[in-house]
Amino acid sequence: MKTFSKRNGYFLSAILATAFFYFNGSDVTTSVYATGTVFALPLALAAMVGIMCERTGIVNIGIEGTMLLSAFVAFFVSSLTQNIIIGLIAAIFTGSMMGLILAVMAVSWRMDQIIAGTIINILATGLTSFLYVQGRTIPGVFQSFEIPVLSKIPFFGPVLFIHGALTFLGIAIILALYVAIYHTTWGLRSRAVGEHPSSADTAGVSVVRLRYINVTIAGAVGALAGAYLSLELVGSFERGFTAGKGFTALALMIFGRWNPLGALAAAMFFGLAQAYANQLMIDQIVNIPSQFTAVLPYIMTIVVLTISAGKVRAPAAEGQPYEKGQA
Amino acid sequence: MSALLEVTGITKRYPGVVANDNISLTVNAGEVVALLGENGAGKSTLLKAVFGLIKPDSGEIKISGTPIVFGDTAGVISRGVGMVHQHFQLVPVMSVAENIILGDEPRRGIFINKKAAHDEILALSKRYGLEVDPEAIIEDLPVGMQQRVEILKALRKDVKLLILDEPTAVLTPQEIDELLGVIRNLANSGVGIVLITHKLHEVMAVADRVVVLRGGKLVGATSPKETDEAGLAQMMVGRSVVLQVNRTEAKRGAVVLEVKGLQVRDDRKILSVKGVDLSLHKGEILGVAGVEGNGQREFVEAICGMRHREAGEVLINGVATKDMHPHAVHKAGISHIPEDREKHGLVANYSIADNLVLNQFDQAPFAKGWVRNLAEVAKSAISTVEKFDIRTPSAFNTASSLSGGNKQKVVVARELSEDLPVLIAAQPTRGVDVGSIEFIHNQLISARDKGAAVLLVSAELDEILSLSDRIAVMSDGKIVAIVESKDADRNYIGRLMAGLKE
């Protein structure tokens, strides 16, 4: 029999806490969880970007920039064409290009990856600030719809099955990535490249090609996270729109042990904390300045990260450029 | 019929060196060709070119008569070439099965067929008589078992040509015998084999032909029938090498290092040094013989302050040294050539010059107060590189750019530079070519003659026998006997090492 692991412990306490809240007020709890899912999704998707890159050994701190520029492009192109689908496609193209630029710097030029990521972030901040114009609008957002039957399940229905198209797409990507990393050829090769690139090289797996592919696709996923913010969640764009979500995602990735489901759980925790903070403000249960409640999720993240730290093991080749034949 | 492997005029230049200079070579099916050469002679470079890991500047490589595309590893593998690399090419956190199938995975749709992989590996392991557990995680396995996984990985695709780059460097004598048997069997079944090794008796035992490289050039070919170990050594180094060390009688002085009741635990927290008493005298070499894994590593690390001493003490000139404080132990007078030079001997990304002064960079003449005197560091480095014959384009290249034997020379040069009263040399010639071995041995003898007390720990019994004045045999964490080397009998010591009583 399997021993009672730490992970099972987290899982059990999460279920118990949810049940406790639910029986103390089912409507409020359901709505808080639904909101929490909405908050969690962009973070979880952004964490997938980190996982895809770091599993192959590339540190990507440019997630924030990728999301920011993609969110802008999504909004701007939607506004120009008055079509949010075209906006979404433009954003995904932008994100892929940013991934490709990172790959060129980190893989081909063997640049320091922190600096390469910083360049991406500065580029995004600069471009969006420069190109941003006030007063533009888009024709609408990706509207929520109900998935028949499933949405009628108490609690789970409203939390998981009444969302916009991008949310469903995002959840599908996260689940698919989990399966892919642990059960496909691509996943096995990616992990090998991230742990011990020369092993992959000597087995005939092209380290350079796989890193290019993964970092570029990850850029597209980051774009989806950005587009979700401007085209589904908010429906507008401001300077500094992503507000550090790309960096929070990196913490969630570590908290989730580079495992897509782990990162998703971490993002849910963070999203719920944020949703509860909002609820506290609405209910005026506690009479404290709103700035404090806004900070709450971040403080909780720090506390949880500290407590759960333990032995975290990053992919061994993370951040190291690879030169063929150096085995 | 064309040869299995045909290498014609391969040249590969790196900044400052010609690693391979117009090398040609053929290997036929069913023969074992040993590739000999000093560290840095270009053997690994040549074989990496054959395996498609690096692109040579010119030349041609044919497998069964058809040329390969340079740099196309996957293509070379698909043509039936397998390679066992000098440094294990295994992903430590993955399972045996995952490592073996990597690069050519059995699939079901887009998914990996884990069941098929498992069965395939069991069949493979049965076919070659190399037993492994497909689900074991690599980092949990002992080195010999990891080597076995490497070999299975190389054999998986019905290999026609198997390349082995120093496969025996980290194996125990029993594992080596086993491996040589596997090599012979494969050759008998028609596989062509290229073997790099520094151990000349292995060459004599298993090779059909011997090809020698020196300074990137092919300098000769012979066969074990036509020559002997001394002849091979001479071809490699280009001068006659004295395989037997000449040394005078030791002038044994007072006790310098004293170890009393030392007990140490290993990484798994198991007591691996179980109460050792030992006295080391000025002007002698005390050899510690033993099969690896009998506590030698923990013993040395505990003396040097790198591992916690569970009980007992270590005294230098009667003064107890501090536990878990390598710097204090060094100051007290112990220099240490560590067993793992990559991990404990060198800072890979520092220059050779900086590595040479790691032990005294903060002292005159290499520093004035807080400021380093880089001119002095450079001057000393250039002369050391010259004196120790460290093969490098310059003293300012990184240590990581050196070949194994030259790295070891850097460590030895540094540790001998201070003339401290005690020198501890752990496996000082592991993975080092015969020319460098001769050199390092002479350095140890001359340190002794200058009055140092030398503790030599080695898994090579021949090394212990030829260098030591006294021999201590370590078995199961205890010193089971100490004999004068003139009374030492090879068989007797071998039996003690194996843990047998008299």
Image: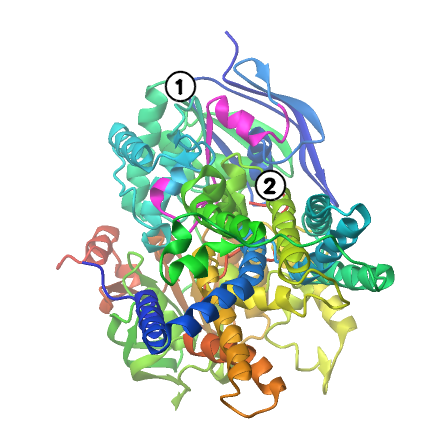
Q: Is mark 1 on a helix, strand or loop?
A: loop
Q: Is residue B52 toward the left or the right of residue B274 in the image?
A: right
Residue B488 circle label = none
Would you name the residue on which mark 2 appears?
A: A325
Asked whether residue B54 is in view, the answer is yes
Q: Is residue B240 toward the left or the right of residue A257 in the image?
A: right
Q: Residues within 10 Å of mark 1 (few under 14, many from 20)?
A: many
Residue situated furthest top in the rendering: B1
Question: Looking at numbered disc 2 in the image, what kind of residue is underneath it?
Answer: Gly
Name above or below for residue B190 compared with residue B294: above
Q: Nearer the viewer, residue B39 or A175?
A: A175
Task: Report, in whole angstroms, how far the alpha carbon at label 2 lies from the one at label 1.
Answer: 28 Å
Q: Which of marks 2 and 1 is in front?
A: 2
Would you say residue B420 sits in the magenta stretch?
no
Q: How many marks?
A: 2
Quadrant assignment for the C terminus of chain A: top right
Q: Residues within 10 Å of mark 2 (few under 14, many from 20)?
A: some
Q: Which of A95 and A317 is in front in this view?
A: A95
Would you say residue B73 sits in the magenta stretch?
yes
Q: Where is residue B7 in the image (x, y as percent from the top left)?
A: 60, 22
Would you name the residue on which mark 1 appears?
A: B30
Magenta-tinted stretch: B69-97
Chain ID of residue with mark 2? A
Q: Is mark 2 on a helix, strand or loop?
A: loop
Q: Using the rendered image, report if marks 2 and 1 lie on a common chain.
A: no
Q: Where is residue A201 in the image (x, y as percent from the top left)?
A: 54, 39
Residue situated furthest left in the rendering: B501
Q: Is residue B216 toward the left or the right of residue B130 in the image?
A: right
Question: Looking at numbered disc 1 in the image, what kind of residue is underneath it?
Answer: Gly
